[in-house]
Image (tube, rainbow, N blue to C red):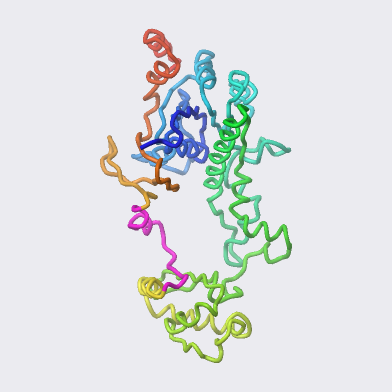
Amino acid sequence: MSRALGGLLVVDLTVEFWGSLAGAMLGDFGASVVRIDALGAPEPQRDDEPAPAWNHRAELVHRNKASLAVDLMSERGRDIVRVLASKADVVLTDRPRAQLQTLGFDYESLAALRADLIYARGSGFGPEGPDRDLPALDELAAARTGMMPILPQPGQPPVYPGHGQMYTTIMLAFGIMAALHHRRRTGEGQQVDTSLLAGNMYGASLDLQAFLAIGGERFLHPISRLDAGNPMSGTVYMSEDGLWVTLTMPDTDRWWPEFAPLVGLDVVDPRFDSHEKRCGEHRLEMMRVLEQAFRTRPAAHWRQVFLEKQLSADVIEDYAFPAADPQVYRNRYIVALEHPSLGAVKTLGFPIFMSDSPARLFRTAPCRGQHSFEVLHDVLGYGEDDITALRDEGTIA
């Protein structure tokens, strides 16, 4: 089975979860991704997070990569990275600009070694403007995008959505592929940048685009679920066992004949016998009726009747649901694997399906420096004696 990105060499100079995950996604489809592990620099970790027995974070973001451990504080170590970059199709990084310039790994320096290089950098707030060098932290970017104040119920503190990193990961990988397509047509390399600010803005794109178009206070403040304009769309109701049911039936006339009997209502009930009544003068009354109805049965009952009647509604689940959902495993969104050190484990799989050149897990996350010899010998052409000398002097590990 062919690999969609086979033959592509990527140098991974990332340090953050979201940047590293973009590299893993390229590796999933067959790119040769060489991760540069800086000697003496442990992987960033929040102070409030205990060190796990299984580094599940690294297993996700560094899978399908080779590890070259290099002392970036030495000139010889930096030279190794430069030689590797000169042979690479893509250099991927999320490091601060000042650090990249100090190391000599900025776009101008590396593009001078290979003119058609694709240099992809994930930033916090974009490559231009007065805030371009602010820390690349998702929480800070999310705070600026307008979504956090509207997520909770009125009177509650803003909620950090936590999804901006994933949007940024995907856009970074997409930007690389667009630049590679351009290079194949023109022979030109270029710099690619996407930011956590952009990722969070596109996470809120539906509301943000509406605000740009029409403005208004309704996009600036949270809306109580009891203030929803349609009791059958975008609304949630608690079931008997405490799980919430969500309804997404904006065209209530279409769904009403099947929906009404399920919740104990007569289809011709004069209070609710038209879309205008359901969403207008009797809206609050209908919401009260639905709240009472959904509390009479457990969530499993509601999911079953929704499926039977093919209604656009479902139960809101926690992480335990996808972790055991056959649909998830059938589509390889989660995969079970036999880890060489830990035995049977589960990990996130592949969000993109391709019929002829699918994503594959052919290498678990490497130990630091696991492939140093392989990269130096097979990719860069170093002799065994030279590699031994580099290891003895501490330039590589």
Residue projecting furthest to the left: 343
Q: Position of residue 216 (x, y in %)?
A: 73, 65
> Toward the viewer: 87 or 166?
87
Residue 223: percent from left, percent from top: 62, 68
The magenta-colored residue range is: 310-330
Q: Does 328 lie within the magenta span?
A: yes
Q: How many marks?
A: 0
**Which residue is at 45% across, 47% downward?**
352
Quadrant of residue 218 in the image? bottom right
Q: The C terminus is located in which quarter?
A: top left
Residue 113, given in percent of the width and then of the height, sits at 59, 18
Quarter of the view holding residue 282? bottom right
Q: Nearer the viewer, residue 51 or 392?
A: 392
Q: Which residue does the image show at 66% across and 39% down from the upper left?
A: 126
Q: Residue 333 location, x and y as percent?
A: 39, 50
In front here: 282 or 48? 282
Residue found at x 45% / y 30%: 33
Residue 165 image-quadrant placement? top right
Q: Residue at x 60, y 49 (%)?
A: 200
